Amino acid sequence: MAVFTVQEYKNRIENVKKEMAKQGIDILIAGNPANMNYLTGYDGKSYYVPQMIVVPIDEEIPYWIGRSMDRNGAKLTTWLPEDKLLFYEDHYVQSLVSHPMNYVADFFKQKKWDRKVIGMDLDLAFTAPRHYLEITKDLPNATFKDTSLLVNWVRIVKSDAEIEFIRNAAKIVDNAFDKTFEFMDVGVRESHAAAVLHHALIGGVGDIGGDYPSGPPTFLTGERASTAHYTWTDLPYEKDQLCLLETAGCYERYHCPMSRTIYFGTPPKELEELGKKTIEAIEVALDCIKPGVTCEEVEATWWKALGGGEVMKEVHRLGYSTGVGYPPDWGEHTASMRANDKTVLEPNMVFHLIPSVWDTNLAFSVSETVRVTETGCEPFATYPRKLYVK
Amino acid sequence: MAVFTVQEYKNRIENVKKEMAKQGIDILIAGNPANMNYLTGYDGKSYYVPQMIVVPIDEEIPYWIGRSMDRNGAKLTTWLPEDKLLFYEDHYVQSLVSHPMNYVADFFKQKKWDRKVIGMDLDLAFTAPRHYLEITKDLPNATFKDTSLLVNWVRIVKSDAEIEFIRNAAKIVDNAFDKTFEFMDVGVRESHAAAVLHHALIGGVGDIGGDYPSGPPTFLTGERASTAHYTWTDLPYEKDQLCLLETAGCYERYHCPMSRTIYFGTPPKELEELGKKTIEAIEVALDCIKPGVTCEEVEATWWKALGGGEVMKEVHRLGYSTGVGYPPDWGEHTASMRANDKTVLEPNMVFHLIPSVWDTNLAFSVSETVRVTETGCEPFATYPRKLYVK
């Protein structure tokens, strides 16, 4: 059984069909696992083989297409009736002679969709070039359009039910930071700290069981604080070391990312100052967020408050839209808080603001996942914004 | 610093170049994160943006190309000198007007590679159709060939250093099963069991710190035992429930997958019989494995020992090659133990044999990750093969 009401999924499909109509798409192939989950509830770690939700604009209920061994998973996790669950046999998998997209093309022919306008993810991981090459070869009279972010843009405004899931994820991440920072100390191995963090993220809080986040946590320690996407080592923490920890609470695939900074020993004055400045700047950014403001305005306000180029050498985006996700990332790939992003904020959009500030020898990270409200914004998590010291 | 010796990486590059020569490839674009790690040591959870190792057949050292913020990660984790680390600025990321592959094409033009034969992953996740469409548009005089599995096939025979990493992963997974099955019982929440498992997988054993496996564990419990790729819920285990647990120990991205079955209560006689039959059959398969035997012979021997079609309705492959990996899976996508796979076994190949047997109401799973030796095979893990009962 899917985790939201059938009505909620039907609303999502209707919103997607409106976009399809605008873009002139007859049949949408949605292959991103986050979009499959969003439209039907489908949940499985099976997306290393081709699988997709197919939305025909003139049928009420979409189709799930996947591997034969995953059909029972689709039965258990989606709201779709059994006759909408289509599957290809195992001999199509990682084969040199047949490809799952040949099966899909045969189904499209049988449905007489072979002269339709077909939308497909052309710029997302999970759709490989051969998926596109095989289906365009098999359906030479169809017209193909890139609809990589069509469903992602529909996802950007969350329902109240989705917001509740992110609230649960926030409870998980608050507790996980608390447990992990309590455990971390000089002499403790990074891998043991990561173990405590995972225990808290997966075990959850009270009745709220945790789900696996779409990316592993980053424990950027010592010289690795200069990197962005490293995980952890099995070395012990040392005195006078800095660690930037970023992770996300996850509940039923919905994420609440968070980042904080910890220092072992007496922090250098420069780090304290950098921390203070970074926290003040994110607070100015949070004050600026409300419906009607654009993403680039939030970023510009933050950049000004931070003192911009005087502090940072490289410009990265301040934040990005987040919500439902699968590995490798929990970003939605739609709106970003950065220069030239004209997206206008609306209530129930959710952003992760992560102004990680790297200097030559220093780094400080503090982030918040926030909901745009009717009048401003509210952070989901409650873990204090400060430089943690051990 | 990369985790293997520079000489080992150079050997790997030489083996890849031999394959490139055979297939007539001048320049190889290796975009799969496992292949990037294999060739250079690069380790980061940054592969939601385009990144690649570029191997020119007539240069000694390959190039890393990625996002600007990940260059420091490449500096820290690869053996490549700094002048081989190329990066595109952040404005290329998730942009409507420019694409990282335009940057790559510009670099290729500058190197005068625009009339060369270029090999590219056309059937792997992480290379999206647009990557292919952009670079072929920008380099109209180059010839493109699909080299999706070129590096994967080079990876199939492991070095002794890689085997040591898998041995460490085996110690981690043995300990993780032990801790988790000890904890699991009637009334225990699945999410709490998953928390204990994660704690053990990440914390590791003694000096051996754990890495995050490329896929989340599956706790296939009760009716979900009929699925293949489901994770866990936050429900408590009930009396007379069955749970199939599959996970992998991971050490420096090298995996040792394992699966076992546990029952809460007095197992039905049919389950005990199914378990016995499944264990006997995998033992026959293990006895059959040795250099010179083909993958399909192992599968056929196992199928016969199991009693084949009398037990299982659906045929899945018996096993697959495994080793280094990143989410979403730890499979190598090369040799599989299944009908028609003529791959001849060689020493230091590593396979995960996972004969999960589903019946209408019953399921039983027991698996082993094994190394092909000079004369037979040896399982990496030591956790006993049996039906666990609580």
Image: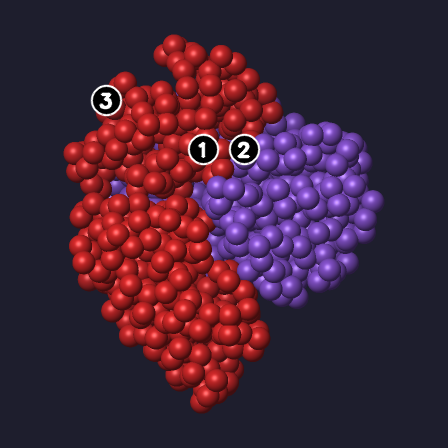
Chain colours: A purple, B red
Position of A271 relative to A249 (above/below):
above
Answer whether labels 1 and 2 touch (C-beta < 8 Å): yes
Which residue is painted at 63% across and 54% down in the image?
A87
Q: Amino acid at mark 3?
A: Glu
Label 1 sits on a secondary structure element that is loop
Q: Give the quarter of the figure containing the C terminus of chain B.
A: bottom left
Q: x, y (%) of residue B286?
A: 29, 65
Which residue is painted at 40% across and 62% down in the image?
B300
Position of A127 relative to A205 (above/below):
above
- For mark 3, name the chain: B
- Left or right? Give the position of A213 relative to A270: right
Q: Nearer the viewer, residue A16 or A46?
A: A46
Residue at label 2?
A129
Q: x, y (%) of residue A293?
A: 67, 33
Q: Give the quarter of the figure containing the N terminus of chain B.
A: top left
Please count the marks in the image. 3
Q: Is residue B240 visible?
A: yes
Residue at label 1?
B121
Q: Is residue A334 visible?
A: no
Answer whether labels 3 and 1 touch (C-beta < 8 Å): no
